[in-house]
Image: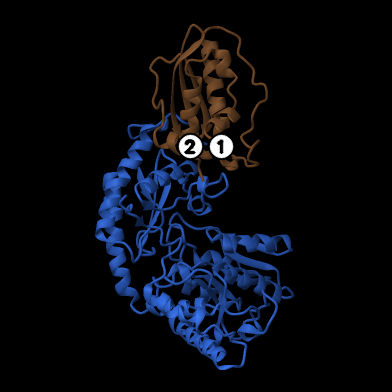
Amino acid sequence: MGEKRIIYMDHSATTYVKQEVLDAMIPYYAGHFGNPSSIYSIARDSKRAIDTARAQVATALGAEPDEIYFTSCGSESDNWAIKGIAYANRKKGNHIITSKIEHHAVIHPCEYLEKEGFVVTYLPVDKYGLVDPAELERAITDKTILVTIMYANNEIGTIEPIAELGAIARKHKIPFHTDAVQAIGHVPIDVKAQNIDLLSLSAHKFYGPKGVGVLYIKKGVKIDNLIHGGGQERRRRAGTENIAGIVGLGKAIELATADIEGHNRKIRALRDRLLKGILAKIPNAHLNGHMERRLPGNINISFEFIEGESMLLWLDDEGICASTGSACTSGSLEPSHVLLATGLPVEISHGSLRLTLGDVNTDADVDFVLGALPKVVTRLREMSPLYKGGKKGGCNVQ
Amino acid sequence: MYSDTVMDHFKNPRNVGEIENADGVGEVGNPTCGDIMNIYLKIENNVVTDAKFKTFGCGAAIASSSMATELVRGKTLEEAWALSNKAVAEALEGLPPIKMHCSVLAEEGIHKAINDYRKKQGLPLWEEKHPHSHDEDSGETCQH
């Protein structure tokens, strides 16, 4: 039996580990396995490897190495930033500002803090998913102790005006955190120029390993610890370091930020051809997100009259890996909070498809998806009671 | 996450389509909840001689429609009415808990189509023994 062709277009979910990254990691599993906290030479090798990775991350972000803290993942970084700032500053105030389209790793810690007596403002977004800096300015009170707005949205790929938002927070002397998990390698980041006080990232979104992330904390920012224990990470984040993971993260961020514009050009060209092709071949399809202020590999399209999960199952049958904002894959019965926040009607949100292109994709992949996707949409529309040959059916949507 | 039988009925759905001049039609669900099921029945001498469906929904919703229409074909109206959502789910070799509401929708669709027929015939409507809420098996509910 021949191996089935797999077209991977879900790079925002995770990426494969690049060979150079893997090669850099391997020695730290069996050879240089020493605990960096120990004193002998193999431990010093581990310590040096972490220092190198820390410097690589600092260079990529325009930060100082001692502002970089390794964590276990993006969710930990977000949790640490939000809870750590909230608890360290609760005598100053209890108000947090975020947006309606954050990842759950930001929204759920905020909801948790609401139960603890904090007050959270969820800023609305426009139909493209953009946060308005003027709205942020209006939401700030003398009780505001944290602003956290994502750099780029994981579902619709919208890139937020981070430098402007950061400048407003800075003006009011409020710590500004950004979840940059989707942005690394796609957007040039300079934490100093962009007024960022805390930034979360995760290695597996830019061809590094899973299970390792970073929280950048600007010097002087007051923050409580999240993980208590040993004295690792300058006493701020306990736990024996995931050395191989950290080495991989360092190598991966170095590769990902070496030529951001060149890389984006290549991915954007593939993405744009795919997007144009889909919109030309499939009627009643709408692009979600912003046309230009968008991650280069991201496509998020809603197809009317059909539901996303059944689309994914058929695409999987064709060997195409994608994702959807439909309720049916989210573990709840509500569709994507991001699509709803942009004002997309609920029933159309159920029919959304996210394709995120990356380094594995080729022109042949684009052709393949352009061949398969219209057939899948047609097949599902033909069995949909909402579809009447392109016109809306008689279903009254409230 | 789905059983082989669910995937079979999803990929090769039986009885897709509408029946022209159907004797009974049942429309259930809500597009804002992500699923709508239309069931069409042809009924002769109190027997379901044909059953078809059109469904907007997830894999489980399509498979449940397919299985439910298969199960009621050739049945008397009393037998078709007695088809429970659990029987549909069992015939599909199980549904994930969060998808059980899809089988409830299929049962409701059949019931609605049968009562549509009875109404047209001037017969008294049959009453649901235990009116379903969509969340009874999954603990989840669609708020729309």
Element type at mark 1 = loop
Q: Provide the residue designation for mark 1.
A: B94
Query: From the viewer's perspective, is residue B15 above or below residue B10?
Result: above
Is residue A374 left or right of A334 when viewed as pictured? left
Query: From the viewer's perspective, is residue A258 above or below residue A99?
Result: below
In depth, the one of A56 and A21 nearer the eye is A21
Expressed as whole percent of the image width and height from the top left, the position of residue B103 reads: 55, 32
Q: Any mark on residue B6, and which?
A: 2
Residues packed near mark 1 inside 10 Å, few (<14), some (14 to 19) or many (20 plus): some
For disc 2, the chain is B
Q: Colour of chain A?
A: blue
- Marked residue nearer the N-terminal end (2 or 1): 2
Quick check: marks 2 and 1 in contact, CB under 8 Å? yes
Residue type (three-letter) at the residue carrying disc 2 = Val
Expressed as whole percent of the image width and height from the top left, the position of residue B42 reads: 44, 14
Cα separation, mark 2 vs mark 1, equals 8 Å
Expressed as whole percent of the image width and height from the top left, the position of residue A272 reads: 29, 59
Residue beneath the point at 72% across and 60% down: A115
Expressed as whole percent of the image width and height from the top left, the position of residue B40 reads: 45, 20
Chain identifier, brown in the render: B
Residues packed near mark 2 inside 10 Å, few (<14), some (14 to 19) or many (20 plus): many
Q: Quadrant of residue B7?
A: top left
